[in-house]
Image (cartoon, coloured by chain):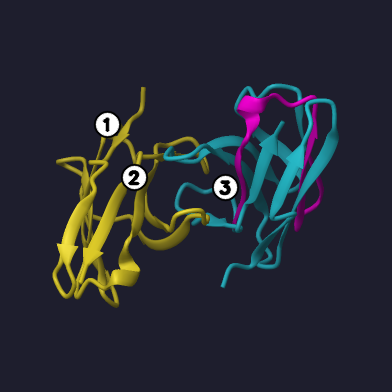
Amino acid sequence: QKEVEQNSGPLSVPEGAIASLNCTYSDRGSQSFFWYRQYSGKSPELIMSIYSNGDKEDGRFTAQLNKASQYVSLLIRDSQPSDSATYLCAVNTGTASKLTFGTGTRLQVTL
Amino acid sequence: DTEVTQTPKHLVMGMTNKKSLKCEQHMGHRAMYWYKQKAKKPPELMFVYSYEKLSINESVPSRFSPECPNSSLLNLHLHALQPEDSALYLCASSKGLAGWDEQYFGPGTRLTVT
């Protein structure tokens, strides 16, 4: 069973702080990793993709990948109340185009 | 803004009805997907089409019937559904079927089966 695991949260951070969202995966052959943001009642929105070990930055978002530890994370700097959502980690585990999703981490940014 | 559109936004249907969900993408992508998402759960893959051909069928019951008329359109025909089929149905598209191809979701159709 190829699994992707996330802490369901809620993760509560104050406005302006760094939110750190974590994801582990079981299939060592996984090559592609994606973070989606999903607001309540809405569809998932792709915010980051990462394929190589290390960090990838896009605005306030940084994705980090460590294939040796089978770990991918998402950092959100200067967190805003509008960042409050569920963040889904998705991993391509080898079968072309088939994503395995984690159960998501609910982030709450408090004023 | 999403370039994957879905209609209708909401659908209520009885167990004996036949209805269709429609999806269109305007990004020139060659792969399209149907997912089902229940409340507080991640999306579950149902079907994948590539170049208008069915590529993956995740053993979905036959009461769900996909159709891909062309590379930018994807339909999901519904017949004799059960109340447990009530969910958010998401369409997605990607450039191709490579593992690194990013998938973009449409806004979804909220389906209620009574």
User: For the magenta stretch, what is the residue range?
Assistant: B67-94
Q: Which residue is mark 1?
A: A26
Q: Is residue A107 shown above or below A96?
A: below
Q: Percent from the top left, x then y, of residue B96?
A: 60, 53
Residue B83 on the magenta span? yes
Q: Which residue is mark 3?
A: B97
Q: Nearer the viewer, mark 2 or mark 3?
A: 2
Residue B26 on the magenta span? no
* Amino acid type for the residue under numbered disc 3: Leu
For residue A104, the mark is 2
Answer yes or no: are tags 3 and 1 on the same subunit: no
* Amino acid type for the residue under numbered disc 1: Ser
Q: How far is mark 2 from mark 3, CA to CA?
A: 24 Å
| Left or right: residue B98 compared with residue A109 | right
Crowd tier of the residue under label 3, counting other residues whose Cα lies within 10 Å: few below 14, some 14–19, many 20 or above: many
Letter of the chain shown yellow in the rendering: A
Q: Percent from the top left, x then y, of residue B91?
A: 63, 50
Between discs 1 and 2, the one toward the N terminus: 1
Look at the image and give the colour of chain B.
Answer: cyan
Q: How far is mark 3 from mark 1, CA to CA?
A: 22 Å
